[in-house]
Every structure is written in structure tokens, then in C-alpha cells.
Image: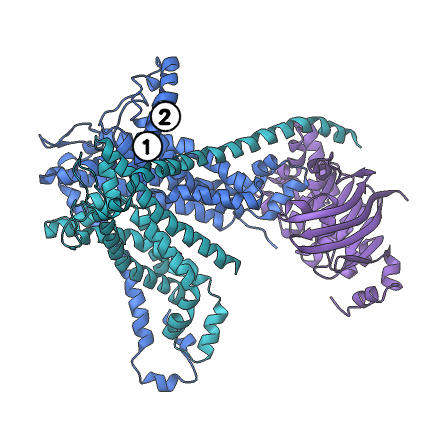
Chain colours: A blue, B purple, C cyan
Amino acid sequence: MDKDIKKKSTTPRGKSNAKKIPLDKIFQAITFTACLGVILLLGFIIFKLFMESSLSVDKFGFKFITSMEWDPVNGEFGAGAYIFGTIVSSLIAILIATPVSVGIALYLTEIAPPWLSTPVGFLVELLAAIPSVIYGLWGIFVFVPFIRQYIQKPIGDLFGWIPLFSGPPLGIGMLSAGLILAIMIIPIITAISRDIISSVPTLQREGAMALGATRWEVIKYATLPFAKSGILGGIILGMGRALGETMAVTMVIGNRPEIKASLFAPAHSMAAVIANEFTEATDDIYLSALIEVGLLLFLVTFIMNGLARFFIWSVARGPKGGIRQ
Amino acid sequence: MEKVIQVNDVKAWYGSLQTLKGISLEISKNRVTAIIGPSGCGKSTFIRCLNRMHEVVPGAKVEGKILINKTDIYSTQVDPVEIRRRIGMVFQKPNPFPTMTIYNNVASGLKLNGVNNKKVLGEAVEKSLRRAALWDEVKDRLNHSGMSLSGGQQQRLCIARALAVEPDILLMDEPASALDPISTLRIEELVQELKQQYTIVIVTHNMQQAARISDYTAFFLNGEIIEYDITENIFTKPKDKRTEDYITGRFG
Amino acid sequence: MSELQSQYAKRYKSRKFINYIMITIMLLSTLLALIPLFSILTHIGISGIKALNLQFITNLPAPVGEPGGGMGNALVGTLVLVSLAALMGIPVGVLTAIYLSEYQQVGLFPSTVRFVADSLLGIPSIVVGIFVYLIIVLPMKSFSALAGGVALGIMLIPIVIRGTEGMLKMVPDSLREAALALGMRKWRVIVSIVLPTAIKGIITTIMLGIARVAGETAPLLLTAFGNHFWSTKLDQPIGALPLQIFNYAISPFDEWHNQAWAGSLLLILVVLILSIIARLATRGNKLN
């Protein structure tokens, strides 16, 4: 990189400037320091999380993940119920958000005329701009009552005998949390899918079209196979976001650390337990256990982000082999 | 001579830019018709109007009348998808479907149309690959990806793909522009063979190519048709000064 | 027309039908996603406007039953926190982006920096809260505005890095070369040619980032903590609009619920206005 600079900054007046303070070097050093700082920041976050959770990691070991016992009074901590809640609510979100988001992305890029797709795309992006606490507020007072009345009651009446839909229609609970998460990650998956789909070469689409493919067939045979792994990347990114989402989940999931078969039952999540209990955690082992929950959350999202990048990047690079010319 | 395609006063736009300013011509059955002209003269737009591919570009618009086998393809009752199915098209750059094998690439058009019989598909694939003069090179690796072929082979694969659905017209939009000279030659030979069965319209910026392979040539300039005649006449005794300037390399 | 062709024609009807079904499904997905957006915006608009007045913006929160309570302190708190975040996130982010775009675009080091930035972007905000709690709140033995500002600043850094880098890369190389050919020093070229050219886009990015962190709640629970009184002291807990909305929303009092809606209206106006202006600005940019 030094070579690059020297080459570029060699100017006719280089001699006279050489006597002055080496501003070029200083400026570059400052920007380089900023980069180092960013790397160190992440390193420090990881270090701190490992350090401060070691008390809990040493004491509970692997049992921390499987055990359901979360008893601050007796100093026993197992995050099983929180992990369960986080995973199940995120899975509900992914299952619902994926088809909807891909549908939107396809509609906006392949079907809708530009005068429609631009404003509608903008509106979908707005969903991402709404703060999560507002999702929570809307969830408590609008969405949850709606779910209770129009989804849980009728389903419970008809299918209440299936464990998945058993129990009283409380509204608050796993289903509502999953659905709100779905709404929150739709703009993320949609945005990435749109980018990926619009990067599918026009020539691919036209190839299918010229064969007499309908619009859907063009999507099925030319667009989707090409965009598949990039969309998968978007889905993983959305999953990462859902796993770490705190406020909206805390406000509608019910905050009860239980594992129930029913989607209607209240549950809890990893991010929610940190938000609810962190500032009340008085003794060291309690705090350490909560930090371990945070560490687990961090590690999972860290890996998911890495995976997502890999898939998206593999599409951006083009298919294996590429078109030889 | 039977006229398969009759074009009457066709105008086309990309947004506010008019790329065709009233084109009229007739194209003969089982002949090769070349469209030549400098870049931006509207030749690609014209060929894309013939199978209603022009309108898939956002903001694109077409006016005028095009009859193919006496059917007005721009009439409101006509479905563009059906038009495209009956007319094969080969693009500037080879565009095999990257996720499909060689076999599936050729069979894709048939499968779209619900042909699932293995025997029928196998025969059609072989026939099309033979017609596209690719069979001998790929018969042992039909399950390889279409992307494993060289550029020239990929382009012949795309020709096979277009032929598999048995169109009677084949549109070629500078099919050899991205290929090396040897592959180009193979494509040109192929065009000669194919005209026994198909009506071929080929766009090219290469005048020698037009002279070598076509029966008729149309010279386009700035969205207008300047001259349209038997190829030999165009290249030996052009009537219009601008045609002469172009073929002698004085512009474009 | 060949035999094959007529066979296709028959098949075509069902293909067309599937095509319409799929397009309808796509259209319905789009409408489905817009329903929550309109529901959220109309509820905030209708419920929020009822409690929103001048007092709401200027007054302190009042105990339940007393009229005239507001979120003035929270509004000020959010301003303080966001300013701190900007003070920390903008310089670090912009300088990092300059290095990535102007000094070393490819290689292990810049890839690492980009990977780290992407990872920071993906960290759950509550985890950032834990981190800042450990490094600032614990040693200072107090929740503080400073801690809240740092938490939001950490979240702002990767947004600014990625956005600014993209904007800097849009500056054509010919401009840099022209300036270098005039005998300008590289840092001069960056500061007086490259940055001013990209400034509109960079500001847009920063505004979007600020809009994003201004609505953050989770990390503030563990850092700024909230405060029901006026405070601008950096070493004291401080209120914030999203925190106040959260506390009121989960309270049992209708009055506070109304205030939560009004607070949301205020917050969303800030967030939406910032993002709409930013997005309109970038669109203009692209056209030019």
C-alpha cells in the first residue's frame, strides 16, 4: 500500500514539499488507526463477554444450555427455556417471512412496473425504519388483541385438541412474538432478495422468455436458480436479526420461562431475559449467567452473519465457471 | 416467394428515445435475411420487435404492424408468450441456464410445454443438438453443466435450445459477436444449413459476415431502413450513397 | 403449424393459469407486508395526536392522575445520547471508510476490517448494552448518559463505515487523478476533492444511521437507564424517548399508554423524517 501512495503522490513539486511535515503519512496513519480501532473494538467485545461469563461457564458448563432451571435465589442457572423461546420464535418468523419476502422481491423486480415498484419498495423499506419499541407498543395494543380474537380463538376452537394450538387464547405468547419478528425481518430479507434478483443477468431472463416461458416460468427457471444462494444469505441474515431482537419480543412474548408445546402459550427469550433482569442482577454469578446468555446470542449471530455474507458474496461473484468468452 | 414476416411502418421507443422511425419490409421464407448498420441504428431493436421481446424492457414502446404467417402479432388478442414460443431467438452472448445440464438446457423449452416423455425428450434433444452441429462434441457429457462448454459451444447449445421447440423462424442477434473466429465460422456454416428448414433473420455488425451468409440484406441507419435488396446487390451495386459509404467503411 | 406446436397450445392454458396464480400470490405478499405498516402508522397517528401537545414536549413526566405530564426530559436525553453517538461514530466511521476506499481497497487487512464492520452491524443491540455496561457502567459505578452514548456510538460506527465507503467509491477515479496531476498531495486530494464530492451521500448515510440508533432501546436499558428528571450530565443516568415509551407501554395505566403513543409519534416523526430526507437525497444523487 505504501508503494501505491508514493507512486500517486510523486508530483513535480515533490521536492519543496518534502521539507514540510509529512502530512500525507500522518493522515494515512490516522485513518489506519481508525481501522485498527474498529478491529480492536470487536476483539474487546468478544474478550469481555468471555471474561465476564467465565464464572457461569465454569460453574454450569454445558448444562447451562440444556438446563431449564433459572433460580437466582439459589444461584442455579440454566438457559434452556430462553434458548428454546428464542429459537422457536425466530423459526416462526423465518417460516412466515421467507415466502412473503421472496414474493415481494419477485413482485417488485419482475412483475411491477417501475412507477409502482419504486414507491412500494420504499414503503417496505420503511418497515425497517420503525424502531423496535414501537413494534412492541403496537404489538401490545393492536396486534396481540387482533391475534387473540381472530387467529387464536377460531383456531383454538377448531384445532384446540392439537397440542400445538392448545391452551387459552392469551394473545401474548410465542405465536405473537414470532409473527411480530416476521414483520420486522421482512424488509431485511426483501431488500437482499431484491438486490440479488436484480443482479440476475437480463440475458438469462431473456433466454427463458424467448423460449416462450411465462413470467412465472422465467422466474422459476432463470431467476430463482440463479438467485437461490443469495436469497438464502438474506434469510440467514434475517434469522440473525430475529434471534437478537429484544424490545418487541420482550413486550409480547409473555416473559415466562417455560417450554410448552402450544404456540399460544407465553414463553421467554434470551434477549428478553437480559433486558428484564440485567439491571436487577445483584450477585456475581447471576450477572455472569446473564452475560453468558449474551455471549451465546453473540456467537450465534456472529456465525450466522458470516454464513450469510458467504452466500450473498457467492452470488455477487457469479455462478461457478462464469461465461467463458 | 412466400413472405413469412411482413413489417409495416414499425416505430419503437426506449423511454423518450425513438430507435425505430417507421420500418417496413417483408422477409422471405427459408431465406437468411441480414440486418446491418452501425451501432445504435436500431437493428437489435428491430429484431426484438419481431418476437415481442422489445416490450419487456421497462419504458419500451412499439407502434405499427407486424404480420407473421398472416397473424398480426401486436393485436390485442395475441399473447406475447405464444409468439415467442413459435420464434426461436439467439442472443449476442451465449446464455445457457447455468444451473442446468446440457441435456436440460436443450430440453427446457419442451419441458416448459409439458413434454415429459423421456423418449420424446431424448430424441428431440439429440435432433436439436445434431442440427446445431454440437451433438458429436457433447454426446458423452450430456449431464455436464452447460457452463462447462466453450463460448462457441455454448452459443450452439443456445441454438439447439431454440430449435428444440421446432420454431419456423429463428432470430439471431449478433450471435457471433462474442466468439472467436473459428467458432464464428462454425456458426456461419450452421446458419447456411439451417436455412433449409427455417426462416432466419440475423443482426450483424460484421459486413463480411452478412455478405457470406445472407440472401437478403437490409441496411439500417438512425432507425430508418435505407436500402433492402438481394445481398449481392447491396454489396456490389448499392443504390443509396449512404449504403455505399457504409459498406466501403466510410463511416460506422 | 406443426403437430408439436398444436400440442403446446393445449398445454398453454394451464401454464397461463399457474402464471396468474403465482403473480397473484406475489401481489398478495406485497399487500400483506404493507398492512402492518399502515396499521402502525395510523394507530400512532390517531392515538398519538390525542396526547401530543406543547406541554408534552416541554414538561417532565407527571405522576399518574396528574395532568400535563410530558416527555421533555426524554427528548433532551435522546438528543444528548444521539449527539454523543455521533461524536464517536462519525469520525471513527468516516476515517475507517477513507482508509478502505482511498488507501487499501484489497487485501487481508481491509477484508478483515469490512468483515469486522459487518459483524458489528449484526451484533444484537442488547449485547452491545452488556459490553458497555461492563466497560463503563461497572467501573463508574453508575448508569450514565456517557455509557448510553457510547453504546449508540458503537452501533453507529459500522453503519457509517459501510455507507461512507460506498459513497467514496462512487467518486470517479479520474477526479482523483486530475487532482494528483495538479500536484496535490494525497491527503489534500481526499480532504478537498474526494470528500466534498461525496459529501451529500455521506451525510445521507449518517442521517440514516442516526435515525436507526435514535430509536434503539435495548442497549439503553443497561447503560443510560432512564431518568424522570431533567438531566444533561454525562455521568448521570439520562432519559430517552424509546426508554420512556417502553416504560409507559408496559405500565398498567391508560394515561401512560396514551403518552406512550404520543411519544411514539414524536419518535417516528424524527426517524421517518430523517430517513425520508436521506432516501430522497440519495435518489437525487443517483439520477445525477
Q: What residue type is labelled 2?
A: Phe
Depth check: B180 or C1 in front? C1
Residue position for label 1 = A139
Confirm whether circles 2 and 1 share one chain: yes
Is residue A88 among the parts visible in the rendering?
no
Residue position for label 2 = A146
Depth check: C256 or B6 in front? C256
On the rendered structure, is C256 left or right of B10? left
Up-down relation of residue A241 to residue C12 (above or below): below
Residue name at image x 18 percent, y 49 percent: C238
Residue name at image x 29 percent, y 73 percent: A26
Q: Residue C49: name its quadrant.
A: top left
Residue name at image x 42 percent, y 50 percent: C276
Residue name at image x 36 percent, y 87 percent: A16
Separation (CA) of disc 2 from disc 1: 9 Å
Q: Which amino acid does label 1 sit on?
A: Gly
